[in-house]
Amino acid sequence: MMKRRALVTGGSGAIGSAIAERLAGDGYAVVVHGYRHRESAERVAEKIRAQGGIAASESFDITNEVATREALETLLKDGPIQLVVNNAGLHDDAPMAGMTGEQWSKVIDVSLHGFFNVTQPLLLPMIGTRWGRIISISSVAGVIGNRGQTNYAAAKAGLHGASKSLAIELASRGITVNVVAPGLIESPSTRASFRPEQIEAIVPMKRVGTAEEVAALVSFLASEQAGYITGQVIGINGGMA
């Protein structure tokens, strides 16, 4: 029996790579997407293959609708992709009073327009299989807001509305659509941005989460056991919201 295929966008970062590795361990053939960090995406795929899994890396700009559609059409020649994890995103923080139009647009382009560009071409092939999982990675900022992140919070909150609507459209087709909204997760950028005493003050659990904890939640939502969960925004944030 052919393995189900999964696509993880932004698969080269801390959370994306943990998700890709976990899904490969779950038995998926994983496509690890990277654009600005394509070498890192290939290293993730190599690690999965070294552990006995099936993985390949792909590089395309998810903000470019034409380029993304062409890349996905090539991938779909090998069969439908039944799990997509929309993990790609970026920060460009500034108070809105000092934010440029470019800062606003590029963050929304990746997190929100990228969601459409990647997900839409995969839908009809996925519907044809009568089974699928669409999981998007958001942020606690999209739920409760965050100073200096009006662009990022707007993009992620838009993702919530899009996912809830798509969940209704696909509910009768055996396809679930959910959002995972992490809080502070261990990474180089988190370590650079937050001192330990700040984390203790912000997070009721008084620690950052791990990428593996996020990956475990994604793994569950992708599983058969989660087949009745759809249209949800699920926080993983140590009690922040």
Image (tube, rainbow, N blue to C red):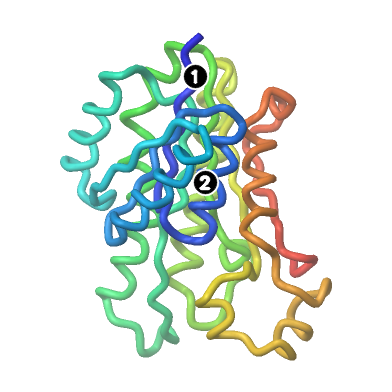
Task: Name the mark nearer the viewer: 2 or 1.
Answer: 1
Looking at the image, which residue is at 28% across and 49% down? 62
User: Would residue 217 appear left or right of 165 to someone viewing this image?
Assistant: right
Residue 178 falls in which quadrant of the image?
Answer: top right
**Residue 89 position (above or below residue 160):** below
Question: x, y (%) of residue 240?
Answer: 75, 69
Q: Which residue lies under the disc numbered 2?
A: 136
Q: In which quarter of the image is the C terminus?
A: bottom right
Q: Which residue is drawn at 51% across and 9% down?
A: 1
Image x and y of residue 122, in percent: 36, 27
Q: Return the residue found at the far right.
A: 205
Q: What amino acid type should be assigned to the residue bearing mark 1? A: Lys
> Eyeballing the image, is 83 above or below 239?
above
SS at mark 1? loop
Q: From what the image shows, is residue 155 above or below residue 71?
A: below
Snapshot quadrant of residue 46: top left
According to the picture, the residue beneath numbered tag 1 turns out to be 3
Residue positioned 43% across, 20% down in the render: 126
User: Are the residues tagged 2 and 1 within 8 Å (C-beta)?
Assistant: no
Q: Which amino acid does label 2 sit on?
A: Ser
